[in-house]
Amino acid sequence: MASPLLLAQQFLSAVTTSGISDQYSGCINSTGSNSTLSSDATQTPGIPTDISSLIGFLVSFSALRDWLKLIVFGSALESCRRLCLYLYTKLYNSFFITARFEEDDSSYDWMMVWLSKQPSWKTARDVQISTRTFNLSSNAVMIEGEDEDPNSIAHGNRPLAYLPSESTVHSFWYKRRWVRVTRVIRQGYYNRREEVIELCIMSTTHKVLNELLIEAKKTYQEAQQNTISIYSSDCNNNWNHIASRPKRPLTSIVLDPGVKDLLIDDARDFMASKSWYSARGIPFRRGYLLYGAPGSGKTSIIHSLAGELGLDVYIISLSRSLLDDTALSDLISNLPEKCIALMEDIDAAFNQTLHRDLDPEDDKENPEEDDEKKSQASTPFAPTTSRVTLSGLLNALDGVGAQEGRILFATTNKYSALDPALCRPGRMDIHIHFKLASKFQARELYRCFYLPDSEKEEREENEKKAIDIKAKPADDSGYTSVDEKTTLLSSSSSSDAGSTVSSDPEPVIFNGSSHRARGPQLSAAEVAALAMQFAEIIPEREFSMAALQGYLMAYKVRPFEAIKDAPAWIEKERHEAAKKAAKASKKTTPSDNV
Ligand SMILES: Nc1ncnc2c1ncn2[C@@H]1O[C@H](COP(=O)(O)OP(=O)(O)OP(=O)(O)O)[C@@H](O)[C@H]1O
């Protein structure tokens, strides 16, 4: 590598040949310091060899002098700029607090809904119109003047909102503090569009920010009051909000007497017993296994309970592609402290097909549906890519990383196929059998369908009150055996199941089908009497509640026809079931012979 001295000498020799050095040659020679000349340098007469004389020589060029001045001046300027920036940041940070909200976090939705309610946000001059609801089904972010039409979603009219345009700055006053808001859109990994809200508050402490956050969260929760949030995991194992569903009233689900009470009381009691569990060193978790006939209300009751308890539902799909034991464990440990974790068709995760096999015992409960599923299961579907093992699931449920405070609901149609380790108390504390519809359920479902709305509201109110009274904290929090509770609660509600109506209702003259609003207006007593008639026709434990619901849906505004045509419908269903059973047995006979 060439030394700087050598380079300087080469530069000088170039200058000398161009004649510039002539005027300076005297000066160079006058230094007379040739003592350190190298053999190369001796070949170029008049070139300074020590550093100080070289610098003196270079400085003697006016252009070089200017360059040097520029470098010194530039460095000083840059240092000054950096110092100012540092001081500004220091000063800014001591007077302002900046908070960022990323789009994939729930706090972003809180902020957007809260901001949409700020007068200055609504009057922004540079706006983007959006139909985003921020995971709310209500019109919490609608623009002023838009009617709050309860049917708007049914008509496809999503509420409109003003969102200030991206990268524009908006400011307003909050509790006598100046607040600046910026919507920043940036490019994330894999060119993913990411949105961040930056909130800058003029405050020296976090007090105002905390107040603002609490207010935003409350505003959001109020807007969300009548909905439950449903979360599901993505392939990166993150929990994503996938939907907000309106709460389903418990009265709309008809189960055998005592089952609903058992579930709600137990879950409420569990949620209020954290200290009881920790005092005894028992993991604060509760598991419910709902098993039985398809379409008997297992999923529906879970959603309804979530609404009643004010918990979000986190769906754990064991057959999700690429889910393995580690990913499952991560998912479960990332659940929030109070939530409902739902594993549907828990038996299906360990089968090699995407469909459920059926338990021979359960076959009896719903032959038609089961035959259908059997034939589906026998078709060559791609095997699931899930790699969850039973031991992986057991560890995830109660291993070290398992989340405390969560309520797990698992459903299955194939109870006897489940491993006893999975069903043991501690993992699944309460097992509830959901059977095909009883006469009592058929009667209540009919009432639910045709009861006037005002009566329904009253009934819901009464049921809610009854639940609230029971919800008072119990002294003996902890595990109670299923048998004990079922007996207790069944007896308390059996009077309802056995009620009868003595007199026949007045027939209402009504023909043909019409819109629901123009259907016959029946009194509660009339509906009750008709419901009794309907229940008498429906055979005990032969049809699922989903099948009965499907039948009544066809008679939404024709309560009398629903009763009149029920025997024919039952015959038809039996006939079809027999046909399917014969077909299925034909299919299996040749292989049996082989
Ligand atoms: N007990 C019930 N009361 C009121 N409606 C019911 C009941 N059972 C089922 N339904 C209705 O039937 C439909 C299916 O119910 P749901 O999905 O809850 O059944 P499920 O037992 O979870 O079925 P699967 O085992 O096939 O998942 C829903 O629309 C629900 O409204």
Image (cartoon, rainbow, N blue to C red):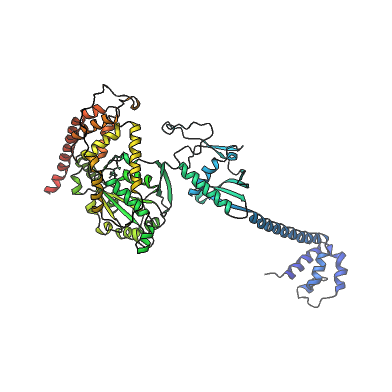
Residue 485 drawn above or below residue 163: below
Which residue is painted at 33% across and 33% down in the image?
Answer: 455
Number of labels in the image equals 0
Left or right of 113 in this view: 233: left
Q: Ligand 1 shows up in which quadrant of the image?
A: top left
Image quarter hosting the N terminus: bottom right
Left or right of 216 in this view: 289: left
Depth check, front residue: 202 or 492: 492
| Residue 507 image point, x, y percent | 24, 24
Residue 331 occupies quadrant? bottom left
Residue 58 occupies quadrant? bottom right
Residue 389 drawn above or below residue 438: below
Depth check, front residue: 78 or 175: 175
Depth check, front residue: 325 or 279: 279
Which residue is painted at 43% across and 32% down in the image?
Answer: 150
| Residue 59 image point, x, y percent | 82, 65
Left or right of 122 in this view: 354: left
Depth check, front residue: 164 or 378: 164
